[in-house]
Image (spheres, helix red, strand yellow):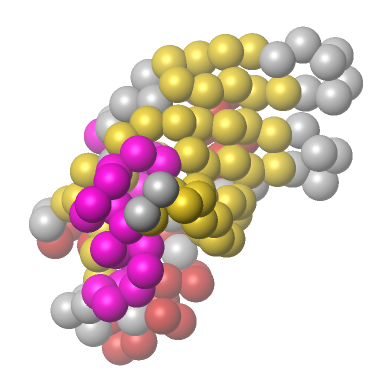
Amino acid sequence: MKELIEFLSKNKFGSLATCMEHQPDNRPMECAFVSEKGLFFYTKQGEDLAEQISKNPNVCFTATDPNYNYIKIKGSVVVSDDEEDQVSILNNSSFAKQVFKEKDRSSMIVFYLPHGKGMMHSHGDNKPVSFEF
């Protein structure tokens, strides 16, 4: 988990894949922060992503560094109603601060990945490392 946290602290932007009506969907996404609860993300009410995770919480998040090393994590997300999680999103994401101006969190949906399976791949040694959390 330590390597995963280190990688995401330097490469927090990636891609989040979901599914809607048996069709894949993918979008740029920021992993805003990682805590003992899991990997945290956010969206706004009314967005396709909010509807998709409410109907099917299974996701896949990938992030890549400038050298094309990457992580891929699959799991089921949980929506959080915890106000502290919203505050942590704003404290850890300059992009979220732009989206939710003047700390108006009324439309913010926080979701996190409490457990996941994945892999880290480094092109330097070309040996993928599997992990679970």
Q: Name the side, left or right, on which 82 lies relative to 11.
A: left
The residue closer to the viewer here, 130 or 94, is 130
**Is the C terminus in the top left, top right, bottom left or bottom right quadrant?**
top left
**Rendered residue at 45%/21% (across/down):** 117
Above or below for 4 versus 132 = below
Quadrant of the rendered structure where residue 75 is?
top left
Reply yes or no: does residue 28 show up in magenta. Answer: no
Residue 99 vertical position relative to residue 3 in the rendered view, above or below: below
Give the residue drawn at x 58%, y 51%: 15
Q: Quadrant of residue 4?
A: top right
Queried whether the magenta region covers residue 40, the answer comes back as yes
Give me the residue at 81% from left, 46% from top.
Answer: 66
In front: 38, or 91? 38
Residue 52 location (% of width, % of height)? 32, 57
Q: In the image as oriented, which residue stretches furthest toward the bottom?
A: 102
Residue drawn at point x = 85 percent, y = 39 percent = 67
Position of 129 relative to 66 (above/below): above
Position of residue 18 in the picture relative to residue 8 (left or right): left
Residue 125 location, quadrant: top right
What are the residue bounds of the magenta stretch?
Answer: 37-59
Q: Position of residue 49 (x, y in %)?
A: 37, 63
Judge from the rendering whether residue 74 lies leftward or rightward of residue 85; answer left or right. right
Where residue 84 appears, as percent x and y from the top left, is 17, 56
